[in-house]
Amino acid sequence: MRPLYFDHNATTPVAPRVLAAMRPYFEAHFGNPGSAHIWGLRAKKAVDEAREQTAALIKARPEEIVFTGCATESNNTVLFGHFPDRAGHLAVSAVEHPSVLAPARALAASGVEVSHIPVTPNGLVDPAEAARRILPQTRLVSVMLAQNETGVIQPVAEIAEMAHAVGAAMHVDASQAVGKIVVDVGGLGADFLTVAGHKLYAPKGVGALFVRRGMDLPPYLLGGGQEGGRRSGTENVALIVGLGEACAMAMEDVAVEEARQRKIGAAIEAGLSGLGLAMRIHGQGAPRLPNTLFVGFSGFRAADILSECVIEEIGCGAGAACHGADTTVSHVLTAMGVPREFAEGTIRLSWGRSTTLDDAAELVARLKNIMRRIGP
């Protein structure tokens, strides 16, 4: 039995060409980019090239890219940086990643007024509800581009117009979108945009933050003044090079790869629909990422499905977690108002560059066997 990895939204493997690009900077080219000798200058050149590659993928200027340690750091930098006095108003969607929702809770506890924008039953942030929650005193609006569980692509550009109309800045967590669909910071109206390396075949431990030219954002880390004074700390050259190479790889074929992965998704959906089970695809009818399927099965528990997936050597995620006799449902499914019988049996399947149509067929066959074994 060959393993089937369908958890690319959790993390992607490091692409071979990315690993090859990084290797010299672990070995021969080990210099500190802040040093003024040949080793340092070579490292600085590599960081500068990676900045250009990252900027090109999202249609930004190189000087607008700040390298960070991860998407969580980028998101925290933006949220906390906008409320140094712990006053004012923040609007976030109800289906944001915890790296946005947790800082929002912390800000609310310290005096910031926070509004959560609800979503429709298919997982779309409702622009009408956003208009009601973006206030004259709003400083920042944070809405992700693609929801990491459902894959639903949000109407960011429309919401950004509302934010800018009241003088607020627009932050977009694009961690799950960059490298999977075309991302244009100008078209989105983003003032800040988050990129995560390990979601697009770069290593874990590196990310980027787009900061539109002219935007004020206090540094989150203080020290030697690296990254134009926005993020102190010696740059992790090898990982930054890896992120740049991953962005260059995506730049070459993102549209072609998107179309290929949509065919895989269609095959999986058709196969699962043919199992004859009570099934609900979360986000159906909304625009979604090409590689994501968040699907609930009535009469099943996600934990039981995942336990069997371990035996069947399938890697995937769940939309509900069991704690003894209790089941905690994802905040995303709760925000969407998904009936509990479907929410409790929800799993997330996400595929990537190495996934084939044969993998999709094998996945459906193994899930069919699982459902037969554990079915009511």
Image (tube, rainbow, N blue to C red):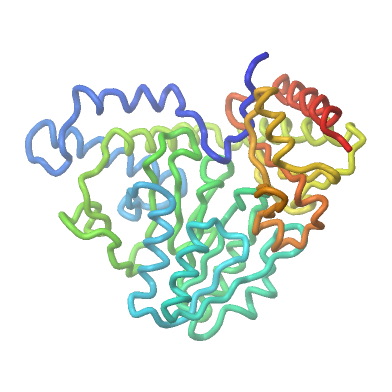
Residue 348's place in the image compared with 218, above or below, is above
Q: Is residue 229 left or right of residue 170?
A: left
Residue drawn at 72 percent across, 29 percent down = 308
Name which residue lies at 58% across and 63% down.
157
| Residue 167 seen in the figure | no
Residue 298 percent across, percent down from the top left: 85, 46
Give the tally of numbered discs. Answer: 0
| Residue 51, quarter of picture | top left
Vertical comparison of 196 with 262: above or below? below
Residue at the spot x=32%, y=28% of the render?
Answer: 22
User: In which quarter of the view is residue 36 placed?
Assistant: top left
Residue 13's spot in the image, x, y percent? 49, 29
| Front residue of 109 and 69 | 109
Q: Answer left or right for 199 relative to 232.
A: right
x%, y% of residue 260?
Answer: 67, 30
Q: Kindly give the residue lying farthest to the bottom in the view shown.
A: 136
Quadrant of the drawing holding the N terminus: top right
Q: Is residue 228 above or below residue 54?
A: below
